[in-house]
Amino acid sequence: MKIGTNANYNHTINKRSGLTNLADAGLFRPDLNRFDEQGNPTSDPATYGEPRNPAEGASKIRDKTIARAFSGNIYGEYKLLESLKIRTELSIISRTSDQNRFIPNWSGFLYTSDIDGYNLEPDDHLKYVSNSSSINTTFTNTLNYSKTFNNHTINAVAGLSWDRARAVINGQRYAGFPDPYKLTDINSAREQYVKTSTINKNALNSLFSRINYNFKDRYLVTLTGRRDGSIKFGPNNRYGFFPSAAAAWNMHNEFFLENNELISQLKIRASYGITGNDNLAAFSFHPLFTTFNNFSATSIYDGINGIAVTGVPNPSIQWEETQQLDIGLEFGIFNSRLNGEIVYYEKNTSGIILFVPTAGQNGATNYTNNTADVSNKGWELTLGGEIIRNNDFNWNTSFNISTNKNLIESLNGGTLFGNGGYLFEGMSPGVIRGFKVVSIAQTQDEIDALNTSAPGGVYQNALLAPGDYIYKDINGDNLINDEDIVDLGNINPDFFGGWNNSLTYKNIDLTFNFQFANGNKKVFGPIAGNGGLDLARPNQNKERFVLDTWTPSNPDAPYARFGSKTHGTSINGHNDRSTIDASYIRLRSASLSYRIPKNLLKGIGLNSARLTLSGNNIFTITDYPGLDPEGVNQQRAGFLFDRQYDSNRAYPITRNFTIAIDLSF
Amino acid sequence: MKTNIYIYIGLFSLAVTCLSSCQLIGDLDDETIEFSLDAETAITDEDSANLALAGAYAGLTSQGNGSIDHYAAIPSSLAGGVQQGIFANLEEATYAINNPQKTDTQSNRNSYATLYQVINKANWIIEKVEELSDADFEVPGRRTEIIAEAKGIRATAHFYLLRLWGQFYDINSAYGITVRTSPVRSADVFPRNTVAETYAAIIADLDAVIASAPDFRQRYYVNKTFGKGLKARVLLYQGDYAGAAALARDVIDNSPSNFSLSTTYASIFDSTSDALYNNTDIIFGSRIDASAGASTSFFYTWQFNYNITPKSAALAAESTTIGSQKILHDSNRIASQQSPGYYGINNLKWENNNTTINHLRISELYLILAEASARASGTVTTEALDALNSIRIRAGATTTGGDGFETYPTTITYAEFLEAVRIEKYIELFGELGEEWFDMVRYDYADGFGSGFQVSDIKEAATDPNKFILPIDELNIQASNNIVIQNPGYN
């Protein structure tokens, strides 16, 4: 009999200002000082408000989040027999988080619509309050069997578990504080104007087992199986069965290789398994009535807080299943001086759960569905070795390279909305689609000629004035439409990998690590539309690329005129001018250290001393014009194209250097 | 050791609390929906039916990207009445050049879904309230009233869908819209109905409104008069002029005292006080309260995204010469919307304060009567001319016989009269739900596309009749697995 427990408490305080990305500061007019002649902070009238300069504006926002997490578990274990144990375990994680964001009136701007919609005044100080609390419990009961007889080892587990999670997030907004420093409690507010609440629930009942078998460390077999029932799916689709099998053969332990001088390790392994995913909101399979009152829709009418259905229920939604096959060979030769691994993998996900377009006649534009079958196939190769091994000098190196081919195998009659249109079967989900640019129109006559020969009198909707891109008419019908959309590249690299090195010469250690990716493309925001080279925000500062746009006096510029609708936006299709190769080689980390010889330390009472100089992200070799070839916009749910787009406004990864001295006494 | 004991006690109490409060184990069926109601069982009595009805009414006010503000603005943009403002995107630019894009739309795709969402809300009410009995309702007759109100909402949404995405002008066309009459329980998709079937469904609902809706609750609720009035407009669209005239006449002559031309035009849009909601001109208008929070997006679309075009302003300042009399089209109905708002953008009728979205005003019924009565008899009838002039007189027209903002004289010819009605509707209803566009299309179709009056006379770019209606966004076609077919000319 054994009882154990474990408790953990975590308290985090996070303070921020309103400056969260480069856009907050970098887009403000650079020609304005922090204060004007009267000593007032400068601001610039924008289209829907008047933002202050970032130093006197967004940076004055005070945002504080306090998060508390308690986690604990308690278990009891009882030995029924020598080889059979019963174990029961309860784990609990309880989290709460409180966020307070205070926005002094001079620290940003109100959306004018807020003022109108919510009885707010332009000079109101605002406060956003958000708190969340969640509790997750897991109750697991297992029976463990473990036995070795002769050369056979068996390890088996069978169990039952219940997972429950419930999280509630509440948000409120307050306005009209008389003082921005002290009277900032919610009682000091004049108005309470926005309120939101969200609940996330999960319940999973599982039955599982696992058997490991090992014969003389030569043959290894693992079999698993689990049956999960999830509340996320309708009564008929709740349960999924997810088995797996893995086998490995340690050939180097066989009698015929046991004393082989060349081969020190040789292992063949293969595994196949199915996993399930229930990543969606609970009860989305069922039609629900709710109340809502948000920016675009309300259920309140004439002061009556009504109820209404939203969304499209999907009663047939079921487990997303991923079948994964791995075949690998591991080897070590010359007394493990050279070792390596070759792996082939195939991952087929069927019924991937995505928030995808649905026919609008059901009253919503999107719903959650088992949309597509997607496959990932590829090779992984790792080669390493001790190139030099002698008393004074050692060099260990390891190089790895991988490929991945990503494909939509089937859409099950559905649709995937990608960029510049849809994704079809046989395409990669990472493909960037759009138009090819033939040239930039130099004269109106050129445009008129194209329109004249076009069937409907319009060659290309956005081709409006000299300086616009002329797209390539791929199918030759004198008209630019969806049929002229082609693949412009893929966000996934053709190959990627890394190279690790560790060198030791006497008392000096050097390690360095390169990473690389090749063939990955990206839509580069500053030269695309949607806030780049279009006119959507005329008062915003632009990046240097605006100097390379077409003007009558710069007819050979690489990019279309500033303000053109042909730059493409995330919804209207990209073009090949803004789709840029983001291949790179990066020295991810390096470290150089010197161990002070022991004989020098004896006199001063030190056991060891080491001096280290290390750095991260030291340099990057790339043609990519943006801050970071790995930069990408955060993906919103259901927006596949977010992954393709780099607004160049996220904080790039930092380069840092560290000097350290390790002393031990 | 002592601390350990405390930890044990702490954990034990936590475990006990959890076991008792948060259901550590249990059957999945015992897990309950929270913060939402099961739609199948939510409507059980009069109170819950009224709540669901309020939710459906609120659906007609839903705004933001691609909701009512867009399905009102798009036709006006097609007609050249308004033009896009600073937030315009490529999609909106394509309406201005009458070559709407069928892919990657937001306004188009969202408006389409929003209208069907309104229909779905109504369908849940109709199905569930029909399952109840009169005994479940405290107010006698309220059960049938609620069903009729929901049908009025459903008919309105179907009609808006038909005239934007269906060949509404041609009763024999196969290109109607999908009529949905039962609640959405899955993503199953149904093919498009014909135009005749769509009209039949709309009229069946409107007949139910006429038979069973309340006489009058408030003008922001569906009432019998709205049923008659909207049916008059529907019959006008179908080309049943005698029927349209009869219903319009019925409303004007016999409607309850609640509905009559308001004394001034400006008062209908005066958002400074709640009197707006009681303006007698409004037969049914969705009520939007500024304090409700969600009333804000009109601001984005109508005020930021759309401006009055110079052409609309010019139309108001132009005159039609009847005989020797030069009759000015407008005094200040369009000009009154030109007051500069934020950053020099004009305010249109939909203010960001208290607002009504006027689904039907009695003024329109005068103009429906004018056109339908004339078309039904092929001449300018006295009632037709009187109806037209009533609207002009309310707008300040005089009858001196001289030039200027005058009533139209009896010497007006039939052709001049129809055009005068069209211009009057353009001006009177400008900036509301885009009626001027549908009138242009109807006028063009009435004497055959390509002959007589042509849409392109008014809007040069609108030469292709296929593009008088919008494409259904391709995502809808794709997602329906081609069960829903695209409008002709957009393939």
Image: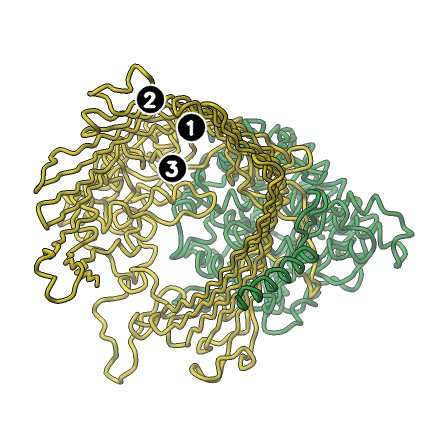
**B109 is higher (above) or lower (below) than B426:** above
Mark 1 vs mark 2, foreground winner is 2
Q: From the top left corner, tell me how far across and down residue A365 is, in percent.
A: 54, 42
Which label belongs to residue A420?
A: 3
Q: Which chain is yellow?
A: A
Q: Nearer the viewer, residue B305 or A633?
A: A633
Mark 3 vs mark 1, foreground winner is 1
Residue located at (20% from left, 60% from top): A662
Split into 4 quadrants, where in the image is the C terminus of chain A?
bottom left
Tell me which label, 2 or 3, sits earlier in the chain.
Answer: 2
For residue B200, what is the image quadrant? top right
Label 3: element kind: loop
Q: From the top left corner, tell me how far across and down residue B140 is, in percent.
A: 90, 56
Which label belongs to residue A347?
A: 1
Specify the amino acid type for callout 2.
Asn
Q: In the current view of this chain or complex, which residue is farthest to the top?
A: A256
Q: Nearer the viewer, residue A165 or B50?
A: A165
Crowding at dot 3, Cα within 10 Å, few <14 / some 14-19 / many 20+, comes out as: many
Q: Is residue B472 visible?
A: no
Label 1: element kind: strand
* Disc 2 to disc 3: CB gap under 8 Å: no
Specify the amino acid type for callout 3.
Gly
Is residue A59 rendered to the left or right of residue A513? right
Respond whether the residues carrying marks 3 and 1 are from the same subunit. Answer: yes
Q: Is residue B185 visible?
A: yes
Q: Which chain is green?
A: B
